[in-house]
Image: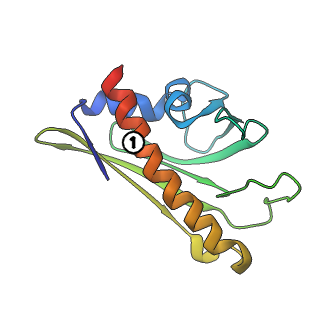
């Protein structure tokens, strides 16, 4: 969870606008926004990971309240085809708090991943989401 002094509409725009999302997340996504039932993808822009392609299937979009997608977490070995594996669900929930907006991010479904990848995927994404919450907070505060 992360609190921001930014209004909910600003935080929502940073989440739902693919270009803005890419700026704080570190990915160059195709399309302008996330649309329920559609996939979007793009190359990671974080130095050293530019060769990786992020691909998400958007599940739900409830403007200024909820955004969720499915993806293959920690899919960092380009020699492996992750498509047969189950995906995890990433959910972003926004709510108003006295000082601004509360952003809650939950990723679930790690227990469905192959045992050999489960612990590493959880560890990488747990640390990754901590950093991404700092990134989005800085982004909405600076823009």
Q: Residue furthest right?
A: 79
* Secondary structure at numbered mark 1: helix
What residue is shown at x 58% (from left), y 77% (from top)? 111
What residue is shown at x 31% (from left), y 27% (from top)? 141
Q: Residue furthest top?
A: 143
**Residue 125 falls in image quadrant:** bottom right
In the image, residue 61 above or below residue 16: below
In the image, residue 33 above or below residue 39: above
Picture mark count: 1
In percent of width and height, residue 80 lies at: 85, 59
**Residue 133 falls in image quadrant:** top left
Q: Mark 1 = which residue? A: 134
In the image, residue 102 above or below residue 83: above
Q: Residue furthest bottom?
A: 115
**The C terminus, quarter of image:** top left
Colouring: rainbow
In percent of width and height, residue 49 lies at: 72, 41
Could you tell whether 47 is left or right of 78 in the image? left
In percent of width and height, residue 73 lies at: 64, 58
Query: Which one is nearer the viewer's eye here, 65 or 109?
Result: 109
Q: Residues within 10 Å of mark 1 (few under 14, many from 20)?
A: few
Q: Residue furthest left?
A: 98
In percent of width and height, residue 9 lies at: 30, 29
What residue is shown at x 67% (from left), y 28% (from top)? 30
């Amino acid at each position: 969870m992360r609190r921001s002094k930014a209004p909910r509409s600003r935080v929502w725009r940073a989440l739902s606008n693919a270009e803005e999302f890419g700026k704080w997340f570190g990915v160059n996504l195709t399309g302008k926004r996330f649309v329920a039932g559609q996939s979007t993808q793009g190359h990671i822009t974080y130095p050293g990971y530019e060769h990786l392609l992020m691909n998400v299937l958007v599940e739900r979009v409830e403007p200024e309240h909820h955004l969720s997608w499915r993806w293959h977490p920690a899919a960092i070995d380009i020699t492996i085809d992750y498509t047969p594996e189950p995906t995890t669900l990433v959910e972003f929930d926004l709510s108003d708090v006295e000082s601004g907006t509360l952003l809650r991010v939950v990723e679930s479904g790690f227990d469905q991943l192959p045992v050999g990848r489960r612990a590493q995927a959880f560890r990488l994404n747990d640390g990754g989401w901590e950093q991404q919450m700092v990134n989005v907070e800085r982004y909405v505060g600076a823009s």
